[in-house]
Image (spheres, grey):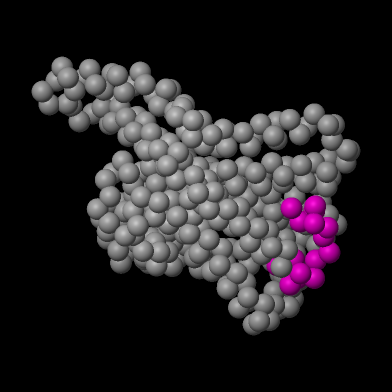
Amino acid sequence: MKKWLGRGLFIALLSGLFYWALRNAPLPDIITLLGKLDATQLIWLVALNGIIFLLITARWWLILRAESRHIPFGPLIGYRLAAFGLSYFTPGPQVGGEPLQIVYLQKQYRLSFARATSAVIMDKLLEFLANFLFLGIGFLAIARSGILTRYTPPPWISLPLILLLVWPLAHILLMYFNKHPLSALLAPLVRIRHIAIKNTAQPPNTWWMNLLNIARLIALSEHLAGTFCRRHFGYLLLSLSASLLVWVGMVYEYLYMLTCFQAQLTFEQALASLTIVRLSFLAPLPAGLGALEASQVLAASAFGLPAALGISLSLLMRARDLLLGGLGLLIAAFNK
């Protein structure tokens, strides 16, 4: 009963989002807008996404290369695509493929589980740092553009947005100065695990023992990530630069999509709209299904543009993500 109730709620939510997004977007208008795209524009969009994905892979490769110079760049592209495919079709904020990255590093390059995990954690921290930086700027753009309110936000509104940026940057800085906040937080669980193993000849294979093992792994991986920050500061800066360039590419891609559809938005309005796109993927739906479409209709309507434009943008982004995600799943299927 619980399973079917959950499925029913999921279908109802999805149906509601699609209905709201499509009710004011006539199909002929959507077809007309999509018909404005020519082959040159589509080729450039594909090429631009290829460049963005190469930068995403380059960040991970730079982190790995700092201590494992034998790892080549080329195969990591396929592994990162496979991880993206798994994350994209997993409900939630675009995570889920990280364990697959760890498995590939172990299987293909004989890295230890802890070292592979620390490289993935470091990659994710730098990704979060760039994401939070963009979201902080994007929230300011939303507040100033009037997409949700029609008044000028008070000056203090920037304070929580600045705090949003603090965590990943502060975490990296703390690790650089040999401080490990996650390890300190998980220290009681690590001690309990040590006592359990010391006093038991064969540790039980139970959920709580697995939880204790995960806590120890996270603590160990954080220490290894901290060592990376201290020993390879140059690689850290290069990886962070790659992460920031990813967002430069994504902003340019969105602006180019608007140009393709001849949409007249200011730079601030475009940033606000793109921020809502990113927030839509936080919805507990695979690939933000329905939430992405609703977000773009909301943005288009708020700026006085036709709802068909929002749906057309959503379809173009959906085609891009399905292409990358589907290719990633194929790679994962052939790299068992």
Residue in view at x 66 percent, y 31 percent: 163
Residue in view at x 61 percent, y 53 percent: 244
Residue in view at x 53 percent, y 53 percent: 238
Residue 145: tell me if it is visible: yes
Occupied quadrant, residue 19: bottom right
Q: Position of residue 324 (x, y in %)?
A: 49, 65
Q: Is 86 included in the stretch rendered in magenta?
A: no
Residue 313: tell me if it is visible: no
Q: Position of residue 330 (x, y in %)?
A: 38, 67
Residue in view at x 36 percent, y 50 percent: 67
Q: Is residue 294 left or right of residue 54?
A: right
Q: Is residue 41 left or right of residue 57?
A: right
Q: Position of residue 233 (x, y in %)?
A: 49, 44
Residue 324, relative to residue 172: is it above or below? below
Occupied quadrant, residue 115: top left
**Most frequent secondary structure within the magenta stretch:** helix
Q: Is 263 included in the stretch rendered in magenta?
A: yes
Q: Nearer the viewer, residue 157 or 74?
A: 74
Residue range (magenta): 257-271
Q: Please state, as top left, top right, bottom left or bottom right, where the C terminus lies in the image.
A: bottom left
**View extreme (bottom): residue:** 39
**View extreme (left): residue:** 201
Q: Is residue 150 left or right of residue 297?
A: right
Residue 268, relative to residue 173: is it above or below? below
Residue 43, relative to residue 64: is it above or below? below
Q: Please state, as top left, top right, bottom left or bottom right, where the N terminus lies in the image.
A: top left
Count of numbered labels shown in the rendering? 0
**View extreme (right): residue:** 151
Q: Position of residue 161 (x, y in %)?
A: 70, 35
